[in-house]
Amino acid sequence: MADSIAARKGPVSRFLDSDLWFSFSHSPLTIVSAIVALALIGAAVLAPVIAPHDPFNLATLNLMDAFNPPAWVEGGNPDFLLGTDDQGRDMLSTIMYGARISLFVGFCSVIFAMVLGVTLGLVAGFVGGTTDAVLMRIADIKLTFPAILVALLVDGLVRAALPRELHDRIALWVVIFAIGISNWVQYARTVRGSTLVEKNKEYVMAARVIGLSSTRIMTSHVLPNVMGPVLVIATLNLGFAILAEATLSFLGVGVPPTQPSLGTLIRIGNDFLFSGEWWITVFPGITLALMVLSVNLLGDWLRDALNPRLR
Amino acid sequence: MRAALLAATAVVGVLAAAGAADARTVRWSASGDPNTMDPHSQNLGTVTMVLQQIYEPLIKRDKDLALEPGLATAWRQVEPNRWRFELRRGVKFHDGADFNADDVVFSITRALAPTSNYGIFVDTVEKAEKVDDNTVDIVTKIPDPILPNKIASVYMMDKEWSEKNNVTAPQNTRAREETHTVRNTNGTGPFRLSVREPDVRTVMLRNDAWWGWADTAKNTSNVTEIVYRPISSDATRIAALLSGEVDFVLDPPLQDLERLKRAPNISVLEGPEIRTIFFAMDVARDELLYSSVKGKNPFKELRVRQALYHAIDIEAIRTRVMRGQAIVTGTFFPEQVNGYVKEEDVRLPFNAERARQLLAEAGYPQGFEVTLDCPNNRYINDEAICQAVAAMWTRIGVKTNLNAMPLANFFPKIQRDDTSIYLLGWGVPTQDALYSFQSLLATRDGAQGNGIWNYGRYSNPRMDQLVTAMKNELDPEKRNAAIREALKIYREDVPHIPLHHQMVPWAVRSNIAMPHQANNQPQFRFVRVN
């Protein structure tokens, strides 16, 4: 009977009845974070449509517009709400495009780390033995290096190995790889732990008995049951990945300056901080802080909401 | 035993403390690091500003850049093609070896070597001859009235030291060669190299044995140690100055000048530099290396060069990028240089419409794409200038991709002619127009100094004739006429797109007294720490 009621309800009302929604709708902080995150993501994704200017179209830049303060400050120009940078680019539009690159790098590197970590964790947990030992020792070694150091190392190696022109073209992917490779261990460890628990359960036994291949068991039976914690880690890691990209770009080794991310914008603006042109660095900085904070708060909430022990 | 050790430690401690009280260290910073310590390998301001504390030429330049005796006490033209130099006696290299005529002959020969980047200063020299231990003759191919001006840029090395360390030829930067001289020095100058960590720090200690300290009225320095640290980030460099971490910033960012002038313990020394910033382009290849145009070279077409020139809004660059710290020009050396003609110092006016029209007439109505090579730590706001100009060119249809890089990558790249268009700043140490024309515009025909910085390989037979006239002509009237005609060609044929002469403010802690120098090269023998 209960089954048939659930079946009659649509997926929306089922979601509205869930514990997850209950916990979400009763946490004002989480709602605010969600709104901020969605607004930032929306602004970033829709940048080409809604940005007031196209900061990458050199043909529309006018150097005489350089160093305009924000519109509400004396000397500001209403055409440029958040002011302009040293080349006359509109800060608001530049930030929207910058957030786009930051989020893109963040998402891609999280997905890369997740795929790599989950695969290795699953294999280590399921196969066990020497494979497990080798993979987990590699993970241990990896854990001894700070993530930013690994990212710098990868970026430096690629930079030295490839000619400059080629490197500039693939720089974005190098950064994604560098951040992803420095983050997979968490996933691998979590998934391995869960897999060790799952693989001795009856349904896995049953699957073995009917003769399914190990790959099949891992992907269609064990994997769905270990994904819960992975999603939590992924959300929390998104904030880290965005921050890591900003750090690399601030150090000047991240994305090329022709595609400025938030970190690049902060670095450029940093040069003008002493001379009173604060808006060039402060607004990208605020955007980055809001983005990372809201994503992290969402991740925290998700972790608590999915943790049966906290219910 | 133990007591003795303790006592010894105490004595050492006291000595160290006494040394510290007496130590007068100047911590100096600028954005770029010298890419070599070889005295004849890179004729670059960033290199010579450090090397000239360590190495000395036969003739030096004083605070006002006038010539004064250096390792030579006297010089005269004994025959039209022969200059005689009387060497200073009792001078020792930092390793203790004596300086003598053999070292001069060796150094001049080294500067003439194919891998030397200082050929321009010895272009007329046939050879150096030892007369006796303290006298050297420099034999020139043609009578050269301005030889002393050039010799003032050729550093003297020790022959034995160079032979021992296998550095008898200058380091070949184009082949990315690493030699002993890249990190080690052995000069005769007022300071000797103590620590050299590329891109980190370069420490020089006072050479108490330097001959010049005897003249206390002239060489008033009390500096015992110079620590040079490159800091590429503008904000970090200024933060270091404001917080007291460095004492002297050679290239304070222009946007911070107002703030620095208001700071209580910092002085800003202002003055123009004899250096002009311009764009030069590949006008030799039949097809550009980095362009969308295939099968022909648009820069060979005068109208394309004029179009790029007309597209530049120089007022915007002067006021926004340079914040007024630049003198706009239509030629390539400032009025302090002999040969300057006011009437030829005229720019093609900013006119984007005219620029588009010229492009269309030249057969590029849709424009084209090109990559601009630009240093990002050599000249004042170099990368910002390139960014701004890239936007201006893109607006008239020449889509400009900017390739900005540190000087350590930039110079080897353009020195291999591996560029289509690039930004360069040219200073004139000899203060004579010949230096600019010969290095930048003469055909690179293998003769000493001709076109050695002409990486666009501009070649114009009339220009070459005029350069030869500037070298050979002894009558100042006729020589100036040749310079004047060459300047006219420069204005009309647009081999470069000139921008401005740099102003070079220095920011220094108020307790340090130093003269500002128009070649942007501080001389620490004049610096006092109070």
Image (spheres, coloured by chain):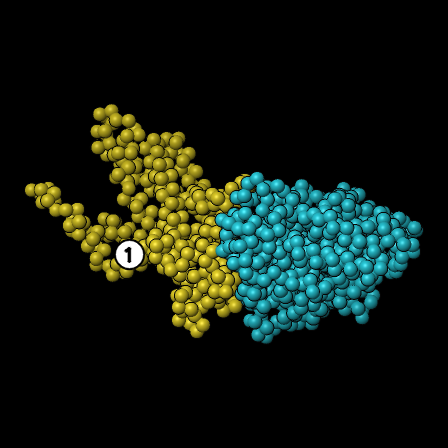
Chain colours: A yellow, B cyan
In front of the other: B120 or B27: B120
Q: Looking at this rendering, what residue extends furthest in the front direction?
A: B361
Would you identify the image quadrant in which residue A44 lies? bottom left
Would you identify the image quadrant in which residue A192 lies? top left
Q: How many labels does the image show?
A: 1
> Residue B316: x percent and y percent?
54, 64
Which residue does the image show at 25% across and 49% down from the upper left? A307
Asked whether, in this view, residue B290 is left or right of residue B443, the answer is: left
- For residue B489, above or below residue B248: above
In front of the other: A191 or B513: B513
In front of the other: B354 or A253: B354
Which residue does the image show at 39% across and 45% down from the upper left? A109
Badge 1 amino acid:
Ala
> Residue A67: x percent and y percent?
48, 66
Asked whether, in this view, residue A252 is left or right of residue A34, the answer is: right
Work out whether residue B327 can be spotted: yes
Q: Looking at this rendering, what residue extends furthest in the top direction?
A: A211
Which residue does the image show at 37% across and 36% down from the upper left? A120
Work out whether residue B210 can be spotted: no
Which residue does the image show at 92% across and 50% down from the upper left? B131
Asked whether, in this view, residue B202 is left or right of residue B96, the answer is: left
Under tag 1, what secondary structure? helix
Q: Mark 1 lies on which chain?
A: A
Report crowding for label 1: few under 14, some 14 to 19, many 20 or more residues within 10 A (C-alpha).
Answer: some
Give the position of the N terminus of chain A as an image quadrant: top left
Asked whether, in this view, residue B320 is left or right of residue B271, the answer is: left
In front of the other: B317 or B112: B317
> Residue B65: x percent and y percent?
76, 64
> Residue A264: x percent and y percent?
47, 55
Kindly identify which residue carries mark 1: A34
